[in-house]
Image: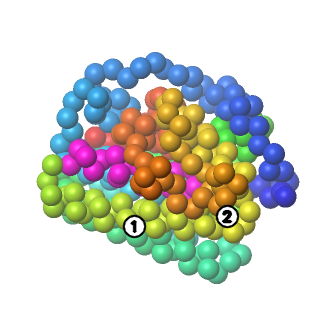
Amino acid sequence: MSTKLADNSTKVTTIDLQAGRRAFLKSAGLMAAGAATLGIVGGAPDVAHAALTDTQILNFALNLEYLEAEFYLVASTGKGLNDADTTGTGTLGEVKGGSKVKFKSNLIKDYAREIANDEEAHVKFLRSALGGSSVARPQINLNSSFTAAARAAGLINNKQKFDAFANEDNFLLAAFIFEDVGVTAYKGAAALISDAGILEAAAGLLAVEAYHAGEIRTLLASKGFFAQANAISDARDSLDGGSDLDQGIRKNKMVNIVPTDDNGLAFSRTPEQVLQVVYLGDEPSAASFFPNGVNS
């Protein structure tokens, strides 16, 4: 089986993950920077040494929601968030890259618009809950970040580019690069939230993100993109530390739409692990989804 990439070349599904990761590290210059230190790690508090406040947790989530909202809104409508929904503390950044996807399937187009609407609503909800404490949208990279991530997964070589918005197949693979990250981020934050009302709201956000992830995983499986999705999963695992937590859409020769542990539970990521995935390394760089880091 093969699939069309953004440059219209055909890429077979034989994935060389290690070769792809080596090419990515060389081209992006993201070699490991060492262990995290006390204080701020790439824009997020180091939870290994300091307790997070509920406000910090919600603002960390808001950064991720900005990324998801901009990605899905641009893909489905050609436009991002309204300016009024992007201001706040910290440095307001622009969104680079992205364009409206020419979907072949009306169903996938509808899925994309539904997710976009949800993510936009999440941004508005978190900003309302935080009030004057909400952070501004940081700079977001929807261009070279996807190329770097695709190289890390071995989907393309270090001379190819990956346009997440070129077609619906690329869009779905791009969505999978960070879609599961939102679920694991909210799951990991649950134990850190002290206010019961905020915890209940976070549970609602987690549920919606899980629905979204299930949609993307199902669509990828329906198209037979098992090797590509599993390679992306392995790349996320290679970025977020030594643990083997992530799961692709095929496991033990069976479809794996719902990634769970032996107890049937979704797994968690710490803020540091989340940042390592969206930064595509230990620190933000020109290849990161957040080139200047997140706002805190």
Can residue 189 be spotted in the picture?
yes
Kind of residue at badge 1: Val
- Quickly name the residue at label 1: 208
Which SS type dominates the magenta stretch? Answer: helix
Rate crowding at label 1 as few (under 14), some (14 to 19) or many (20 or more) other CA atoms within 10 Å: some
Q: Position of residue 232 (x, y in %)?
A: 63, 46
In this rendering, the answer to whether 183 lies above or below 272 is below
Label 1: which secondary element: helix
Residue at 51 percent across and 74 percent down: it is: 113
Q: Which residue is mark 2?
A: 221
Closer to the N terminus: mark 2 or mark 1?
Answer: 1
Disc 2 marks a residue whose amino acid type is: Ala
Name the quadrant containing residue 152. Answer: top right
Residue 284 falls within the magenta-colored stretch: no
Left or right: 163, with 11 as reference point? left
Q: Point out residue 96 in the picture as x, y percentages from the top left corner.
A: 53, 50
Instruction: Look at the image and tell me whether residue 135 can be seen.
Output: no
Question: Looking at the image, which residue is at 64% across and 52% down?
Answer: 251
Q: Is residue 11 above or below residue 281?
A: below
Q: Which residue is at the front of the view, 222 or 2? A: 222
Q: Is residue 181 magenta?
A: yes
In the picture, measured across the screen, residue 216 lies left or right of residue 70, that is right
Viewer-proximal residue among 124 and 14:
14
Magenta stretch, residue numbers: 175-193
Quadrant for the C terminus, please.
Answer: top left
Q: Nearer the viewer, residue 259 or 115?
A: 259
Q: Nearer the viewer, mark 2 or mark 1?
A: 2
Residue 27 pos. (x, y %):
67, 29
The residue under the point 85% across, 54% down is: 10
Measuring 53% from the left and 22% from the top, which residue is drawn there? 32
